[in-house]
Image: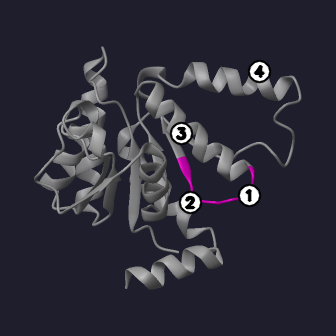
Amino acid sequence: MRLNSVCVYCGSGFGGDPAFKDAAVTVGRALGEAGINLVYGGGNVGLMGTVAHAALQGGGHVTGIIPDFLKSRERMLEDIQETVVVGDMHTRKKLMFDRADAFVAMPGGIGTLEELIEQMTWAQLGQHAKPILLLSINGFWDPLLTLLAHMRGHGFLRPGLDPAFLVTTDPADVVGMLRDAVAKRAPSPEEEALVRERL
């Protein structure tokens, strides 16, 4: 398979570390310059807006998917090529999943964590095998990795049920790692059907 689109989960704020914004710029620009479509939450604020603007500046195509009730709160970004306004969060997350070949979780809050964990859960249940990458800038995701190790140690993440994911601390690694991971996997029949629909 070829990596055509990446869904980036990240905060609607900037967080307390300037490195988070720098990473968003690096990831967005790298996706745009590589010709990989960015799928994201559609907002124009925080890291979300930063990664989208950087992808556009890199010459990329950006798809924003946003629920109607968040259009004003997250200040929907008007400059992107495609905006999909949906009725609720469940539809948003499903469309983001359908449109993406892989997922990146950058620093963010509860919403970012929930989106990441949902993809891990679906992967654990065999509903997809799309790569999931945690971009752990300055150790941001270390507490989650510790929690997963804790669950593993207590037998709740058993062999064969432990969700596969990638981790890097360097935003420059994201595109290459995801390309390699996507190239190694075969598409499911559902994914093949979605690719045909896009053509």
Instruction: Identify whether 137 is placed above or below 101.
Output: above
Q: Name the kind of residue labelled 2 in the image.
A: Ala
Q: Is residue 22 left or right of residue 164?
A: left
| Secondary structure mostly taken by the magenta-highlighted segment of the chain | loop
Q: Is residue 147 magenta?
A: no
At x 52%, y 44%, the residue is: 133
Q: Which mark is residue 181?
A: 2
Q: CA distance from mark 4 to mark 2?
A: 26 Å
Residue 96 as seen in the image, left or right of residue 180: left
Give the extent of the magenta segment: 125-132
Question: What residue lies at 67% left-to-right and 21% top-to-bottom?
Answer: 146
Neighbor class of circle 3 (other Cα within 10 Å; few <14, some 14-19, many 20+) is: many
- Residue hosting label 3: 116
Residue type, numbered disc 4 = His
Residue 71 coordinates in the image, percent (x, y): 22, 41
Q: Please, what secondary structure does the residue beneath circle 3 have?
A: helix
Can you tell which mark lies on residue 150?
A: 4
- Is residue 126 in the magenta section? yes
Q: Nearer the viewer, residue 172 or 191?
A: 191
Residue 176 to residue 68: above or below: below
**Residue carrying label 1:** 126
